[in-house]
Image (cartoon, helix red, strand yellow):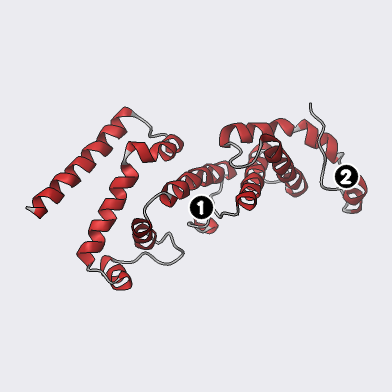
Amino acid sequence: MAEYTFPWSTAQLDARGCTHDIEQLLRQHDGLVHAVIRRHGSGVLTYEEALQAGRIGLWRALLGYDPQRDTAFSTYAWVAIWRHIRRAGAQASGELTGGLIPASQMQGPDPAQYADRLWVHEALCILLSRLPDRLRQVLLARYGLDGHPPRSLRQLGALLGLSHERVRQLEQEALAWLRHPAHSLLLRRRLGTNTVAEYRRAVARNAALRRARRRRST
């Protein structure tokens, strides 16, 4: 196993009352860090940078884990490792890729489920970031993804200076863009809906939307 450095000293750990050989435990569970990177990727980080960030998350998990709780250490540590890698990636890129949905709305009783939701949420953020500005603005406000309560068509129309019918059209256009197989591949993979049947349904819905637009324009 490759050598790596820790962001603390043994003396510091002993002063905090640690009764275990932390370095030994870190090496024992280092494969978990690699597993997290293999599943979720390293983003803008190099593999070594992701490893270092993940090992800090593992260290924090070792210090914070309560064996009295009905949660396996690997499940508890997975979330801590992944969050530290994501945070390091956000700092490296100068971007915030996770702030659309409050964490309080995403957490569940199972940390593994929480990690999966964050994994899906990241893909959703990436997908939304590729929308044209006006369409993204409509969807974020319409579904309450901008930190505010969801707005009705009329409320959003008043905010944007548009009729509620125009807002509805923009919403439908944005959803059609998101559904398109060429755009939604990453999200579909993470949701487990990357199937031929799902693609056909998406294509059919978008075709129906185009036909409706043509009828309205004639």
Name the residue that disc number 1 marks: 106
Q: What element carries label 2?
A: loop
Q: Residue at x 38, y 58 (%)?
A: 133
In the image, residue 136 above or below residue 116: below
Q: In this view, does 14 lie to the left or right of 151?
A: right
Image location (x, y in percent) of residue 115: 56, 44
Image location (x, y in percent) of residue 52: 73, 41
In the rendered structure, which amino acid carries the disc numbered 2? Thr
Distance from the alpha carbon under mark 2 to that under mark 1: 34 Å
Front residue of 125 and 107: 125
Image location (x, y in percent) of residue 107: 54, 52
Name the residue that disc number 2 marks: 19
In the image, residue 85 above or below residue 147: above
Q: Which residue is drawn at 90% across and 45% down?
A: 10
Q: Is mark 1 on a helix, strand or loop?
A: helix
Where on the picture, by quarter, is residue 148? bottom left
Q: Is residue 188 left or right of residue 102?
A: left
| Among numbered discs 2 and 1, the one appearing first in the sequence | 2
In the rendered structure, which amino acid carries the disc numbered 1? Met
